[in-house]
Amino acid sequence: MKTLGRVIVIMILVAATAEVSAFVYFAGIKGGKDWVPAYLRSDTTESWRTETDPWGAWHLPNATARHIGRCFDVAVRSNSHGARDRERTVDGKGRVLVLGDSFVEGWGVDEEHRFSNVMETLLEREVLNFGSDYFLGPLQYEILYRELASRFEHDLLVIGFAPHNDFTDNDLSIWGGWRGRNRYRPYYGPDTETPVYLVDKPAAGLSLADLRWMNSSATETLTNLARQYTWSAGFAKEAAALVRKQAKVRNVNPSDGYSGYRDFEDAQLENVLRSLDALIGMAKMKGRSVLLAILPARNDLTVPDSENKLRPIVMEFARDREVAVIDILQTGGLTNEDFQTCDWFWSARGHGKVGQAIAAEARKILAID
């Protein structure tokens, strides 16, 4: 018993030392910029987000929250269909519908500053936003469009393709471990026609916060608490990101890290193009035009044209299907000043540039004078 007591005391001392050291590192040295435990944050998006639909990540209908990061604090809301958008009717002439992930949802920016809202002003017609954060990838875009978004009348579908994580979001080899163990989201499987789900479909109406605790064992609950409520968790997260960057991500240029414009794998490319092909096919069957927009993250700015393997592939893919394509890395005029200071997403200024670029292309497709 004495030995056990000593072990417990040592473990407590080690944990306390780690916690104090992490506090000094993040709160002192870094000034609270890279990690703050949940009890010091007022972010309520976990009670706004959900993951109970066939495509996974989405929002509870008619809900509001505050999204707080290290360099932003914005109010978010959803309409009756769960989209981060104002209320939309199913019917409507001459409309544009935008589909995608965090970049389309508008991570860290007020709704009125998003590129889809900028487009709505420039085009003087409705632009419906069906974007969602929380690792929404091309397979999910395909399912979201089929199950929900395609019901809304529109003349033009804009597919926001974000190479930064769209090659990995539905890759089961990456998500098959602890990351995806308790999440209801689809993955590419060996059967190209059938998505793989790792958990059963949860009951509708549950928030991400509800699901996080309901689907966890006692050990996982304690682990989740430690991940959210300790300073040490931030240090562990930073260390894990460094390890992944150096060891687990293949084909990466060590000088500037991963870029989906250059570092995707052949199997990932095949899966993504299959989903994009399905999306284009659904839209064309309904007589809708399609614009494929490639959306760069901050780290993609370092990729020179000579290393951009993705653009010629997507250009040929789009040409074969007779759809328009725009690569914002090439035509958007983005610089480092157009991104959030604390992450790789666009700032309001960046959204403005992207909105102008895509609106100009949409104007040609829709023959708007």
Image (cartoon, grey):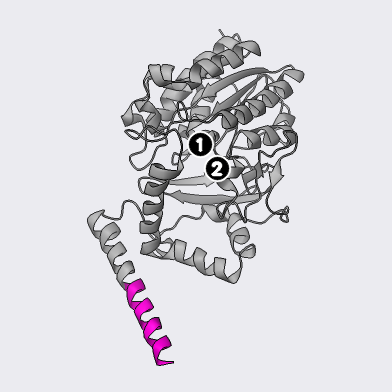
- Using the image, tell me which numbered label, if any, was put on residue 70: none
**Mark 2: which secondary structure?**
loop
| Residue receiving disc 1 | 165
Q: Residue furthest left?
A: 29
- Taking depth in this image into account, of 268 and 124 the one nearest to the observer is 268
Of the two numbered discs 2 and 1 in the rendering, the one whose residue sits closer to the viewer: 1
User: Which picture quadrant has residue 283?
Assistant: top right
Tell me where residue 133 sits by quadrant: top right
Left or right of 14? Residue 168 is: right
Amino acid bearing label 1: Asn
Q: Secondary structure at mark 1?
A: helix
Q: Measuring from the top left, give residue 191's x and y in whole percent.
A: 74, 36
Distance between mark 2 and mark 1 Cα atoms: 8 Å
**Amino acid type, callout 2:** Phe
Circles 2 and 1: CB atoms closer than 8 Å: yes
Q: How far across and down, in percent of the image, does residue 369 sit?
A: 55, 7
**Residue stretch rendered in magenta on the structure:** 1-16
Question: Which residue appears at 29% of the width and 68% of the height?
Answer: 20
Between discs 2 and 1, the one toward the N terminus? 2
Task: Name the residue tied to disc 2.
Answer: 135
Quarter location, residue 71: top left
From the image, give the main secondary structure of the stretch colored magenta: helix
